[in-house]
């Protein structure tokens, strides 16, 4: 691994100041499960690595604040999947966190890191999109909020500006009774990256939110607010037409090694149908989510 | 156009750890991993260097109560932490029941992955003393065994849990 300077700021202001003074030569380190691989293989050669785990404002934790569940930036997957509020109100996120990497990876990997890494295959992105997540971001200009759908650009690229960092992920508490599910296809059981990853929610008013990843340069959110997609009484041709629209932005790369584009598109449709069915069943069976 | 990679200076940072119950203080370069420091500086060679991308689990150690791939942790990140490696499981020369079960069930063939397997299984049983087969398979999914001893390894964990119930 190439040498670098190591900084461990204890406050947000200090972290932002380091990012401002070091420019693009600095990289943020949270869990390290993506960064250290790329430091070792030489695809990243920063002069400064800024470890944010000492920053007081970013300390791990999940709290309720003003109608939102707020997940601090350095909260790891193991704690997200075990949190009773996440499991109850954001079930698809708990399910997605539980399939990221292995136990060892989930013990280190942070939610903010998973998002900032901006892998199109990140399993936590589709659930956070259906749950209308907002990123709380700090930078030289103070705090701003970025809706997650406006955060992803393409693989490895986000709308974070220079010297900005994500401090928390905020999820509005469920405005209506809903069911939700996360589903994925992998090449093998156990520890693998997703060939298709998808989350779906259906609420008591028939609103369907469907988000999917690993089928294009960034994860995609589709919404049906007509109620027709989730209504079993809707004629099949009409439901398929709505699905066509929701899945239209899928554009899998022919160069990916995990699965070919035809397979991904076929499985995306299968997972979408299963997702709507699974979310509807959970809606019917549960009184709170 | 190709550019020469820039070589930057690395910080040398003082760290203090407790490794297998023993306090250790040292100076480490910021770009060295916990795995490198355990193996090369502390001569604890149970944790193995293998895939270096967090897929095989041969370098698994317990960091503040949780298993990690030590190839994906910088040594400086572990400052102030307690670490248990495979060498720290046995006490006074006596293997733990889990380690005995690995031997009894024939779970050890070439042995390369076993320190990581035992550390992961130890942490699994500490969190969940009576796991199902499915929970064992998920709990050990981050530890690959190229000899294919997965059934024997699962049996060893099941036998340990059963022994603890009796």
Image (tube, grey):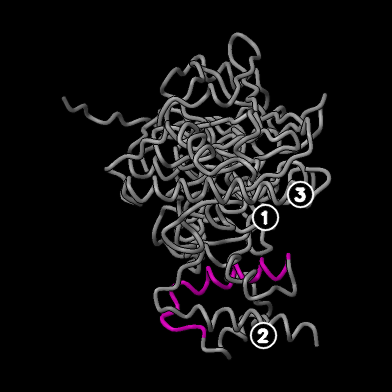
Q: Indicate the position of residue A283 as horizontal and vertical percent values.
A: 74, 46
- Quote the CA–CA distance across marks 2 and 3: 41 Å
Secondary element at tag 2 = helix
Q: Residues within 10 Å of mark 1 (few under 14, many from 20)?
A: some
Q: Is A125 drawn above or below residue A145 in the view shown?
A: below
Q: Residue at x 62, y 60 (%)?
A: B62
Q: Which mark is residue A121?
A: none
Residue closer to the observer: A19 or B131: B131
Secondary element at tag 3 = helix
Residue position for label 3 = A284
- Outermost residue toward the bottom? B104
Q: Indicate the position of residue A196 as horizontal and vertical percent values.
A: 45, 47
B158 horizontally vs B140: left or right = right
Q: Chain of mark 2?
A: B
- Quote the CA–CA distance across marks 1 and 2: 28 Å
Dot in front, 3 or 1:
3
The answer, for residue A112, to whether it is visible in the render is yes
- Quote the CA–CA distance across marks 3 and 1: 47 Å
- Classify residue A124 by image quadrant: top right
- Outermost residue toward the left? B1
Q: Chain of mark 1?
A: B
């Amino acid at each position: 691994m190439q040498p670098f300077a190591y900084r461990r700021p204890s406050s947000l202001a200090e972290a932002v100041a380091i990012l401002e003074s070091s420019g693009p030569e600095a990289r943020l380190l949270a869990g390290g499960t993506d960064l250290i691989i790329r430091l070792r293989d030489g695809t990243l050669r920063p002069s400064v690595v800024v470890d944010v785990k000492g920053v007081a404002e970013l300390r791990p934790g999940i709290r309720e604040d003003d109608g939102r569940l707020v997940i601090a930036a350095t909260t790891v997957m193991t704690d997200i999947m075990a949190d009773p509020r996440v499991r109850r109100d954001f079930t698809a996120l708990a399910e997605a966190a539980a399939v990221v990497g292995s136990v060892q990876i989930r013990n280190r990997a942070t939610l903010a890191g998973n998002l900032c890494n901006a892998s199109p295959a990140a399993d936590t992105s589709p659930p956070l999109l259906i749950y209308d997540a907002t990123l709380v971001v700090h930078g030289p200009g103070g705090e701003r909020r970025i809706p997650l759908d406006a955060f992803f650009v393409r693989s490895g690229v986000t709308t974070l500006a220079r010297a900005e960092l994500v401090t928390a992920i905020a999820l509005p508490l469920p405005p209506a009774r809903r069911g939700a599910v996360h589903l994925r296809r992998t090449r093998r059981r156990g520890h693998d990256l997703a060939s298709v990853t998808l989350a779906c929610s259906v609420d008591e008013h028939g609103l369907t939110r469907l988000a999917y990843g690993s089928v294009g340069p960034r994860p995609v959110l589709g919404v049906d607010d007509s109620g027709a997609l989730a209504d079993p009484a809707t004629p099949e041709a009409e439901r398929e037409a709505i699905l066509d629209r929701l899945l239209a932005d899928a554009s899998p790369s022919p160069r990916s090694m995990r699965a070919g584009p035809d397979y991904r598109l076929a499985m995306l449709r299968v997972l979408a149908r299963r997702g709507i069915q699974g979310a509807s069943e959970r809606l019917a069976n549960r009184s709170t989510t | 156009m190709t550019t020469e990679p820039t070589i930057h200076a690395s910080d040398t940072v003082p760290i203090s750890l407790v490794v297998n119950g023993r306090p250790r203080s040292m100076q480490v370069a910021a770009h060295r991993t916990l795995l490198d420091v355990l193996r090369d500086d502390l001569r604890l060679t149970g944790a193995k260097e293998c895939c270096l991308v967090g897929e095989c689990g041969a370098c698994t150690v317990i960091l503040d109560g949780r298993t990690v791939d030590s190839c994906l942790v910088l040594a400086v990140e572990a400052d102030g932490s307690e670490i248990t490696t495979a060498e720290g499981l046995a006490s006074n020369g006596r293997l733990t029941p889990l380690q005995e079960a690995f031997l009894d069930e024939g779970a050890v063939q070439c042995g390369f992955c076993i320190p990581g397997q035992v550390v992961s299984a130890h942490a699994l049983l500490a969190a969940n003393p009576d796991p199902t087969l499915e929970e064992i398979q998920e709990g050990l999914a981050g530890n690959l065994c190229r000899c294919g001893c997965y059934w024997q390894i699962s049996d060893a964990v099941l036998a340990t849990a059963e022994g603890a119930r009796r």
